[in-house]
Amino acid sequence: MRLPAHSCDVGLALTALAASIVPMTDATVPVDAAALAAVPTSTAPIITVIEPEPQAPIGRLREWLAAEGLTLRMVRPEAGDPLPSLDDLGDGLVVLGGPMSAHAEADHPWITPLRDLLHGVVETRVPAVAICLGAQIAAEAIGGTTAAPSPYGTERGVVDLELKDAAAADPLFSEIVDEAVRAAVRAGISTHDGTRLPVLVSHDDGVVSLPATATLLASSAGAPVQAWRAGRLLALQHHPESTPVRMERVESRITAWKLGAVDDVEELTHLSDADLPAEALAAGRRVRADAERAEPVVQAFGRALARVLARQARAHRLHKASANV
């Protein structure tokens, strides 16, 4: 059987069916730490989270952002939620993944306004994180190119994030990387002298080129563009919000589909683990085991990502407040 074409991975679809403060040249907002600490909790930053479909949920990124004192406003365009304007985003933006292609505007008309929104976010330096499909749409928004499917093939499971020299000096990404590398050292996971980190991936499509205005931060064997930054937007092809359990479920369902365990993808809705071929269950268990070994690094990366976004969002909020005085 031929797998349906989409962005982050067929596993996302199958899993769903189965169950002057602002500088001109720096990505950071250099606000006095005392000023940030003085911002009352009643003015907690608001982050808009665009979740294209429930099969690519915000997952544990929700708790990590909440732990940083952020208020999340969920927008689900496939459920009919209108996309906010640039002025209505609040203090930051997160765009998650989904099973559709970044080029599927005909079937998903919200992709075009999301692309325009992401262009505005980069131009006005709003703090943002874009994951998988979000990163692909963001790349096209600023003049990059996304291939569907990627000429480099599919990536699923755990892969090494190969850090570029720019990662160590990046005003946003370097802090996240440092945290993840420390977690790896504590867990006995090799980082090849701080140049590689294990991450969770699940995608068929991928960004194949970036404009000169973007900074490439990391690659992988199957994705030359794995992480990058433009303005205050950090884009990730991998999934820090995912979990070993979710990775297992995705892999087992994809394998069952490839083995021809069902004649129609809809049938996966009714399959329990007991209904899956042994080979599919074994594939899922292998991916879960790999993900569990990488878990200390993945969690450290995700928590640091949330912290960096929160700090930028508070600075952005403070800047807006001072501008209105």
Image (cartoon, rainbow, N blue to C red):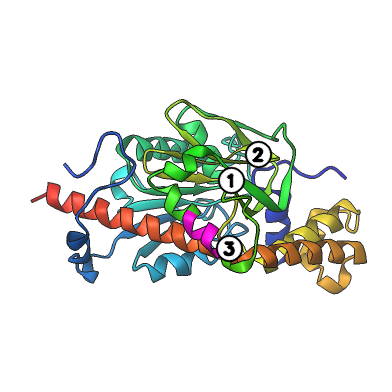
Q: Label 3: state its secondary structure.
A: helix
- Disc nearer the start of the sequence (1/2): 2
Q: Quadrant of the N terminus?
A: top right
The answer to the question of whether label 1 and label 2 lie on touching residues, with beta carbons closer than 8 A, is yes
CA separation, marks 2 and 3? 25 Å
Which residue appears at 16% of the width and 53% of the height? 321
Residue lying at 84% horizontally and 42% vertically, measured from the top left: 2
**Residue extending farthest bottom:** 274
Residue 170 position in % (x across, y down): 42, 43
Q: Which residues are magenta?
A: 178-183
Does any portion of residue 109 appear in the rendered image? no
Q: Residue furthest left?
A: 325
Does 49 sit left or right of 223 as displayed? left
Query: To which residue does mark 2 refer?
Result: 223
Work out whether mark 2 precedes mark 3 in sequence or the reverse, and give the earlier one: 3
- Measure the C-alpha gap from mark 1 to mark 2: 8 Å
Question: What residue sits right under mark 1 in the picture?
Answer: 237
Mark 3–mark 1 Cα distance, whole angstroms, equals: 24 Å
Q: Is residue 148 magenta?
A: no
Instruction: Please tell me whether mark 2 or mark 3 is closer to you in this view.
Output: 3
Q: Residue at x 45, y 32 (%)?
A: 214
Label the magenta part by its dominant secondary structure: helix
Residue marked by disc 3: 185
Mark 3 nearby-residue class (10 Å; few <14, some 14–19, many ≥20): some
Q: Position of residue 29 (x, y in %)?
A: 27, 47
Q: Residues within 10 Å of mark 1 (few under 14, many from 20)?
A: many
